[in-house]
Image: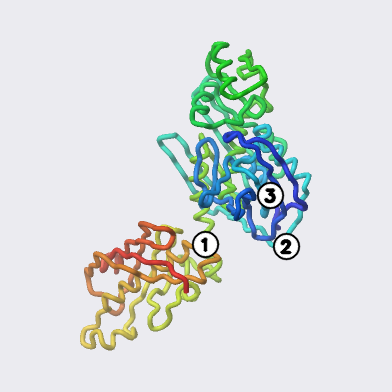
Amino acid sequence: MLEKQRTIEKEITIQGTGLHTGTNCVMTFKPAPENYGIKFIRVDLGDKPEIPATADYVVDVSRGTTIGIGEARVHTIEHVLAAIVGLQIDNIKIEIDGIEPPVIDGSSLPFVNKLLEAGFVKQDANKDYLIIDETITYKNEDEQVEFVALPSDSYRMTVMVDYQNPALGSQHSGMFDLEKEFITEFAPARTFCFLSEIEPLIEQGLIQGGNIDNAVVIVDHDMSEEKVLEIKAKLGLKADIKIGTTGFFNENSLRFKNEPVRHKLLDMLGDLALIGAPIKAQILAARPGHKANVEFAKKIRKLYQQKKIEKKYQNIKKQGVVFDIEAIQKILPHRYPFLLVDKIIDLEFDKSVRGVKSVTFNELFFQGHFPDRRVMPGVLILEALAQTGGILMLNSLPENEIQNKLVYFMKIDNAKFRKPVVPGDQLILEAEMVGKTGGKYVSMKTKAFVEGQLVCEADMMAAIVDK
């Protein structure tokens, strides 16, 4: 795999009709600087909003993946993203003057050909690979969907689909070398649907740009000629359509014997681009779809964001330590004698954190609380919990905002002190995020333990404010 970031050499344009919205648009790929990432730019809107192609901005997954900021949307982005990831492009601007990229032939190949025509430029910055070093799983029992990400020194995918439908049945496929296999074996795989799905999709206001040239229609039941003509009218098709003997509309032949599952792999490749970083992992997927793909991408993206933060603040990796005291001082503004967290031993991005405070005889507050029976003040246990929670909150912000923010605690409810904390005790401080409002206000449940016994707990609310 490539080690340096790359962008395209020159801008290039493609145009056409969107599959689901039926709207026409012009889409222009443009070079982008190092560490820019992949962003769609709605040039038809007044402020030309830029929408990063990451899981944080996904707003809909019905029959395609849609990202958006405010009222700005870009629908059905997965085929474009698959082309970009398949060609290992890290930084690119995608200017679009409508709400949906053109479907062209229903595959990623037209986008691949345009990007190849634009050429590539190697940039100075190294690729920021997310290296999966532990097994990550995702399951949806109701839909019988399962994903597994395993450690690997390259990017590999294996996909199985089972529609329990005799027209398609079970299929599987695997991509084991992105550079050698993507362009020829997966980019040409076209989108597909069953004949029985067409009318429900039309009723949902989808496939307004669909026709027999940009999708494979699999015949899964008999249909009268009258009904076929009705579907033709609903789709606004001029060309004749007929149910042949091959199992597809108009005797349309497949590009690959297992083209449907290859297209599912292509969709998944595009959706997993929403992780926001190139990855090294082996992905195994059973019955994937856009909803599950995006949920899995969100889970892996959180891991990527966490690893990125850990790498930024923790200079020397230590066994069992996420952040040592040096790293904590880079994150929190507190200093002696009011820095009350010694290390962070566990962090699950945007969810929970666990810290440690070793309480010694030399603590300044023991001089007056109390000279004859030293007890850590309850308010300071709460402060230690708040500081621990502050690390979780600040690190739930975008990286470029962390240094300019502070956490102010607004409310403490249900505070209870169960047991005195004395010199020699080691406090285990836990904070779990339970709610977010507008990205500014955060609610947390906090608990402090000594030797496994609960000594303090409280519900807290805090605000993230500018310094």
Say if 258 sits above or below 346 in the image.
Answer: above
Q: Mark 1 or 2, which is nearer the eye? A: 1
* Residue 380 in sight: yes
Name the amino acid, label 2.
Answer: Asp
Q: Mark 1 or 3, which is nearer the eye? A: 1
Measured Cα–Cα span from mark 3 to mark 2? 15 Å
Say if 375 sits above or below 456 in the image.
Answer: below
- Quarter assignment of residue 105: top right
Q: x and y percent of residue 332 in the render?
A: 45, 74
Say if 142 sits above or below 357 in the image.
Answer: above
**Which residue was labeled with disc 1?**
398
Q: Which of the two residues, 92 or 43, is positioned nearer the viewer here?
A: 43
Give left or right: position of 172 versus 409: right
Q: Which of the two residues, 27 or 141, is positioned nearer the viewer here?
A: 27
Which residue lies at the image location 65% right of the left edge and 45% below the top edge? 97
* Residue 150 in sight: no
| Labels 3 and 2 touching (C-beta < 8 A) | no
Residue at disc 3, secondary structure: loop
**Which residue was labeled with disc 3?**
88
Which residue lies at the image location 67% right of the left edge and 55% below the top edge? 91
Q: x and y percent of residue 163 in the render?
A: 51, 27
**Which residue was labeled with disc 2?**
124
Count of marks, rendered view: 3
Of the two numbered discs 1 and 2 on the same chain, state the one appearing first in sequence: 2
Q: Which mark is residue 148?
A: none
Give left or right: position of 8 versus 324: right
Measured Cα–Cα span from mark 1 to mark 3? 24 Å
Residue at disc 2, secondary structure: strand
